[in-house]
Image: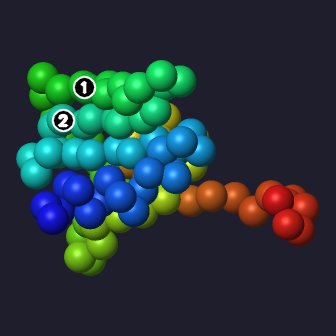
Amino acid sequence: MTACTLWFANTWSWMLAGHLFVFTSRRRDRVKILYWDRDGFAVWSKRLEEGTYAVPFGDGGEVRREITAQELGALLSGIDLSAAQRRKRYRRVGS
């Protein structure tokens, strides 16, 4: 079994639940987003002409991380989240 086949087998249920899978190139100048679109898989891709994406993981050996929609938007907009701080907000228990 290839690594891709193993990954796909373990993430199939997440795909159907609406999760997005974000991949970056080693140079971090390209990003691809894989998702399920009602009747098949779709891939969204973007390549930067200059600069790199400030990916919020990968420095400490971490290769996978769950991020929020807001963090994804900031990533695609060029905002470096490593220097940002989240302010404390009210959050209901269990949500």
Residue 61 visible, this orientation: yes
In the picture, measured across the screen, residue 59 lies left or right of residue 50, that is right
Label 2: element kind:
strand
Quadrant location, the C terminus: bottom right
- Residue underneath mark 2: 30
Picture residue at 54% right of the left edge, 42% below the top: 16
Picture residue at 30% right of the left edge, 72% below the top: 62
Picture residue at 23% right of the left edge, 76% below the top: 61
Pinpoint residue 33: horizontal percent, then vertical percent. 34, 35
Pinpoint residue 92: horizontal percent, then vertical percent. 90, 62
Q: Characterize the local packing of mark 2: few (<14), some (14-19) or many (20 or more) Cα atoms within 10 angstroms.
A: some
Pinpoint residue 14: horizontal percent, then vertical percent. 51, 52
Number of on-image labels = 2
- Residue underneath mark 1: 46
Which circle marks residue 35 in the picture?
none
Outermost residue on the left side: it is 27
In three-dimensional space, the C-alpha distance between marks 2 and 1, rounded to whole angstroms, equals 6 Å
Outermost residue on the front side: it is 1
Question: Sequence order check: which comes first, mark 2 or mark 1?
Answer: 2
Asked if residue 65 is positioned above or below residue 36 in the image, the reply reads below
In the picture, measured across the screen, residue 8 lies left or right of residue 2, that is right
Q: Which sits in the foreground, 57 or 23?
A: 23
Q: Quadrant of residue 91?
A: bottom right
Label 1: element kind:
strand
